[in-house]
Amino acid sequence: NAGVTQTPKFRILKIGQSMTLQCAQDMNHNYMYWYRQDPGMGLKLIYYSVGAGITDKGEVPNGYNVSRSTTEDFPLRLELAAPSQTSVYFCASYPGQGIKRAQPQHFGDGTRLSIL
Amino acid sequence: ILNVEQSPQSLHVQEGDSTNFTCSFPSSNFYALHWYRWETAKSPEALFVMTLNGDEKKKGRISATLNTKEGYSYLYIKGSQPEDSATYLCASGYNQGGKLIFGQGTELSVKP
């Protein structure tokens, strides 16, 4: 199993450009998450999804959009890139409701994004 | 707004020292406490997930305890090694498998 796969690993964007960060998992997990990591701030939740067709905002959703058309994929879209969106983005997945015991989230390797 | 606080923010120790960090979290409607180890340029790696008051978990030289009534967890590293250098994140969950609230992390540096 590949686990959680994020692409690209690195990207530089110009202000105002748009792009989509890809995330795919092959563990049949219902729950998926997008986080951003800023220095000294830990991980902040951008958006999450509890299943195909269902998404919800996290702590810092402004400037981002998501979709969840399949269980496997959870892309994150930046429509008008701004310097404040320079960050490291992590995607994670979790089995979801009904598991017998609490389990950790599984993280991808991250996408390092710079907006210049 | 739920806040998870970790202390200290950073820690510098010598090889062989034992150390511990604290994670404080709101105890109402608590479900699970997670600890992750996060090395630069890598993804966070799960260390422990604990749910019950009084839980203690151990993985090699690293162990963790949980107090859900007062809302804190301790992570201990015995005999720190340079390879233990990383950021240690804790996160608390408030429904079964739902969102996690992450602390800001404790950055550990172990000098040989």
Image: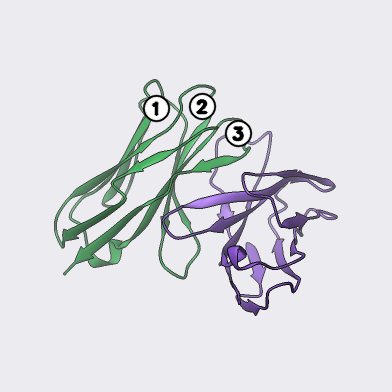
Chain colours: A purple, B green
Query: Which amino acid type is shown beneath numbered disc 2?
Result: Phe
Q: From the viewer's perspective, tell me whether residue B98 is left or right of residue B38.
A: right
Q: From the viewer's perspective, tell me whether residue B90 is left or right of residue A47.
A: left
Task: Give the vertical position of A100 relative to B59 (above or below).
Answer: above
Q: Nearer the viewer, residue B34 or A100?
A: B34
Chain ID of residue with mark 3? A
Q: From the viewer's perspective, tell me whether residue B89 is left or right of residue B81.
A: right
Dots 3, 1 in contact, CB < 8 A: no
Residue located at (47% from left, 36% from top): B3
| Quadrant housing the C terminus of chain A | bottom right
Chain ID of residue with mark 1? B
Residue B30 - label: 2
> Label 2 to label 3, Cα distance in Å?
17 Å
Task: Give the vertical position of A71 relative to B83 (above or below).
Answer: above
Query: Which amino acid type is shown beneath numbered disc 3?
Result: Lys
Q: From the viewer's perspective, tell me whether residue A50 is left or right of residue A35.
A: right
Tag 2 secondary structure? loop
**Residue under numbered circle 3:** A100
> Label 3 to label 1, Cα distance in Å?
23 Å
Tag 1 secondary structure? loop
Front label number (2 vs 3): 2
List x then y, in percent, for residue A79.
77, 65
Q: Are marks 3 and 1 on the same chain?
A: no
**Residue under numbered circle 1:** B71
